[in-house]
Image (spheres, rainbow, N blue to C red):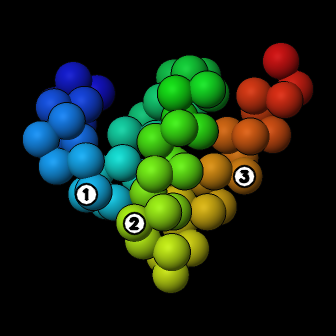
Amino acid sequence: IGSLRAAVACEPDHARAHTALGKLLLEDKAFTAATRHLQTAVKFAPGDPQPRKLLEQARRARDQR
């Protein structure tokens, strides 16, 4: 997670890094942080279905807490 945080800090528009970080944060149950990174991934890669799918999962999980 640390290296992905560094990657998005260096390249804030790197959608794949935000997606990967969001996925790991989702698995770690850090739903708010996952949502934030996945929203950024969707912003920079609107045609990629993976961050959208993960974003919906993160939102559902966050809202169930």
Q: Which residue is mark 3?
A: 56
Query: Is the residue under label 1 in contact with that under label 2 (CB below 8 Å)?
Result: yes
Q: Residue 2 location in percent, x, y?
A: 21, 23
Quote the CA–CA distance across marks 2 and 3: 17 Å
The residue under label 2 is 44
**Other residues around mark 2 within 10 Å, as few (<14) / some (14–19) / many (≥20):** some
The residue that appears at 43% across and 35% down in the rendered structure is 24
Q: From the image, which quarter does the C terminus lie in?
A: top right
Check disc 1 and report the residue beneath it: 14
Which of the two labelled residues, at mark 2 and mark 3, occupies the earlier sequence position? 2
Q: CA distance from mark 2 to mark 1?
A: 7 Å
Kindly indicate the quadrant of the structure image that contains residue 32: top right
Q: Residue 10 in the image: x percent, y percent?
A: 12, 41
Q: Earlier in the sequence, mark 3 or mark 1?
A: 1
SS state under label 1: loop
Mark 2 or mark 1: which comes first in sequence? 1
Residue 49's image quarter? bottom right
Within 10 Å of disc 1 (Cα), the crowding (few <14, some 14-19, many 20+) is: some
Q: Is residue 27 visible?
A: no
Image point 54% across, 50% down: which residue?
39
Give the amino acid at mark 2.
Answer: Phe
Question: Looking at the image, which is closer to me, 42 or 23?
Answer: 42
Q: Amino acid at mark 1?
A: His
Name the secondary structure under disc 2: helix
Residue 22: x and y in percent read: 46, 41
**In-image side of 42 versus 15 (left or right):** right
Residue that sits furthest to the left in the current view: 10
- The N terminus appears in which quarter of the rendering? top left
Relative to residue 54, is residue 40 drawn left or right? left
The secondary element bearing badge 3 is classed as: helix
Tell me which amino acid carries mark 3: Glu
Q: Is residue 10 above or below residue 30?
A: below
